Amino acid sequence: MRTVPGPTDHVVVVGAGLSGLACALHLLGAGRRVTVVERDAGPGGRAGRLRLGGYEIDTGPTVLTMPHLADEAFAAVGDSLRHHVELVPLHPAYRARFADGTALDVHTDGEAMEEEVRRFAGPAEADGYRRLRDWLERLYRAQMRRFVDANFDSPFQLLHPDLARLAALGGFGRLDRGIGRFLQDPRLRRVFSFQALYAGVAPARALAAYAVIAYMDTVAGVWFPKGGMHALPRGMADAASGAGAEFRWSSEVTELERSGDRVRAVRLASGERIACDAVVLTCELPAAHELLGRAPRRPVRLRHSPSAVVLHAGTDRTWDSLAHHTLSFGAAWEQTFEELTRSGRLMSDPSLLITRPTTHDPRLAPAGRHLHYVLAPCPNTAVGPSAETWRDLGPRYRDSLVAELERRGLDGFADSVQEEALITPLDWTAQGHAAGSPFSVSHTFAQTGPFRPRNLIRGVENAVLAGCGTTPGVGVPTVLLSGKLAAARVTGGTPRRTVTSLPSGPRAARTAPATPAGVHDPS
């Protein structure tokens, strides 16, 4: 594994999102002095916090899976996730509601889900679910250590027995066909393949290997942090500060001072200079490349995932049909992905994610009120409406979403709204997200594993990247891993390897102490 040469005693981490905080904790655990520079007034990055009329709103991800990856970062400094964040396991993980009026609770417990599938679709599908679950677990074990939790220096690193195991499992076939080998009911197939949208690829074109995301969502477990998702980066920042990290809030990096091939210091908008031995950039890829003064050459231009419109609504009522997370599927399916990824049209029959965080933490809203988060995928600005178009389009689309919610059983939603915030590709663009998408570079084959933008930049020997635009990819678990992998590029070793399964119950977030730094990554 290639690592940063020369001294690495003091590392500046640019950005206090999940990847930057994970990186800082792993660096601190390896004995480095760390300064974290963040342009916002507090931690979180995408997982930020908006306070609106007494409502505490998560501005980014709402689904937490694989919390042991966060605990690894805490463990690097002798701390623990459970000391900072109270996690609530969600049962069900999701509720799926379909256009025909049927509904299914998605349980991560195998026996509970088998019974639910039997009730919903009969004994043959229940048997198929058990076989699907076994396949998902084997896919996860075949991929995680070698292809996800790994730094790549060359595509030749793929040549390993795990690659043959993955191929034997059908990992290089298509996702929808892979799921279809076990389930015939099209509604069930959607539950286990919609996660391809996270990767920015339609299930009909996504590799079956991406079913590992379905493993995280439907097998490994889904948790909710009390205080909202923002409690996680806040706890990570507290742990890093307690371990000696220096945080510079409301500070924007405008320049990297270089001498030859090394970064010698970062310069802030205030004019201040912070000398360093290495720098980890967790900002968006375009911003990182601008600071570095170069972008890696690629044979084809990077493709980005679809974007999303998010409606945060504080209401004076709620609806019993909603779980903590509710997937509301439209009747269309293949057409939806065609619209989102190719034709660039808004979903004509939308599938939506509705999250109600006040289900498990009423303190996020004023007494007697409720908080609803409605996410509607939409085309990114490279294939769909431009960012500026959303200035006028946004309010109209908001009204159509609200009308659709009422048609799907949330009667009186429009009149219940007391406070709201609408986020569109215009806002994502203003935050610096390429193609107006908060989901970054999509996971096509040419942008996955060793073909994804690397976390080392040629020509700058002591700069490392972290975040969803680089290795290993998009999503809370992979972003946490990206911070660990970036730290390994600096320290020359990984603090510890991820486990291949996650126990259920109240001890699920606990892990063993970190392995001493300096152990070389065998990959």
Image (cartoon, rainbow, N blue to C red):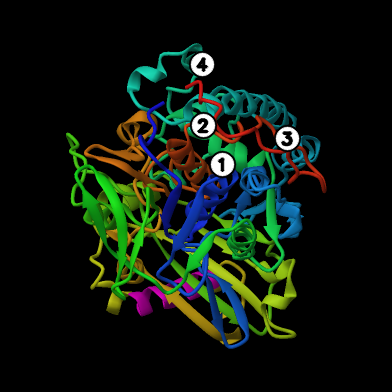
Mark 3 element type: loop
Image quadrant holding the N terminus, namely top left
Earlier along the polypeptide chain: callout 2 or callout 4? 4
Depicted 124 relative to depicted 421: above or below: above
Foreground mark, 1 or 3?
1
Q: CA distance from mark 1 to mark 3?
A: 53 Å
Depicted 249 relative to depicted 18: above or below: below
Mark 2 element type: loop
Q: Position of residue 508 (x, y in %)?
A: 76, 44
Q: Is residue 86 visible?
A: yes
Left or right of residue 520, residue 125 in this image:
right
Residue span colored magenta: 394-405
Residue named by callout 3: 122
Residue named by callout 2: 493
Residue named by callout 4: 162
Earlier along the polypeptide chain: callout 3 or callout 2? 3
